Amino acid sequence: AMVHAMTACWAGWRPKEVQAFGEALGREAIAPRVYATTRDLLRGLHARGLKVAVVSGSPRLLVEAAVRGLGLPFDALVV
């Protein structure tokens, strides 16, 4: 049921539209809620060679764009 609902949410959207929405979502809705110390921590872990992964149940295209909108590094994406 959940997969069907998620598919219906994005029906008719072009990939570029989903990406633009995801980037805006990352910048405007998610980024303001991320603690500054969390950003520093993730960047520091990444700089030290540790892998940073994002885990989500949302569509890959959307999550990748949202993470790019946050400006945080990530090495793996699990959707």
Image (tube, rainbow, N blue to C red):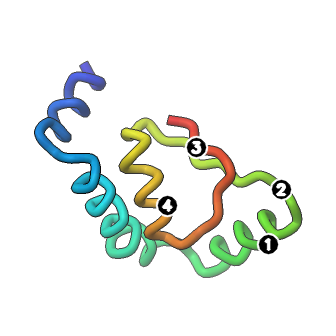
Q: Nearer the viewer, mark 1 or mark 3?
A: 3
Residue 78 image point, x, y percent: 57, 37
Query: Which image quarter holds the N terminus?
Result: top left
Residue 52 image point, x, y percent: 71, 54
Q: Earlier in the sequence, mark 1 or mark 4?
A: 1
Q: Earlier in the sequence, mark 1 or mark 3?
A: 1
The residue tagged 2 is 50
Is residue 32 toward the left or the right of residue 71 in the image? left
x 36%, y 65%: residue: 23
The residue tagged 4 is 67
Q: Earlier in the sequence, mark 3 or mark 4?
A: 4
Label 4 amino acid? Val
Q: Are marks 3 and 4 in contact (CB under 8 Å)?
A: yes
Q: Which structural element holds mark 3?
A: strand
Residue 55 vertical position relative to residue 50 in the rendered view, above or below: above
x 72%, y 71%: residue: 43
Relative to the observer, which residue lies in front, 17 or 52? 17
Label 2 amino acid? Leu
Q: Earlier in the sequence, mark 2 or mark 4?
A: 2
Q: Earlier in the sequence, mark 2 or mark 3?
A: 2
Q: On residue 77, which mark appears? A: 3
Q: Are marks 1 and 3 in contact (CB under 8 Å)?
A: no
Marks 2 and 4, Cα distance to the nearest angstrom?
17 Å
Is residue 69 toward the left or the right of residue 15 in the image? right
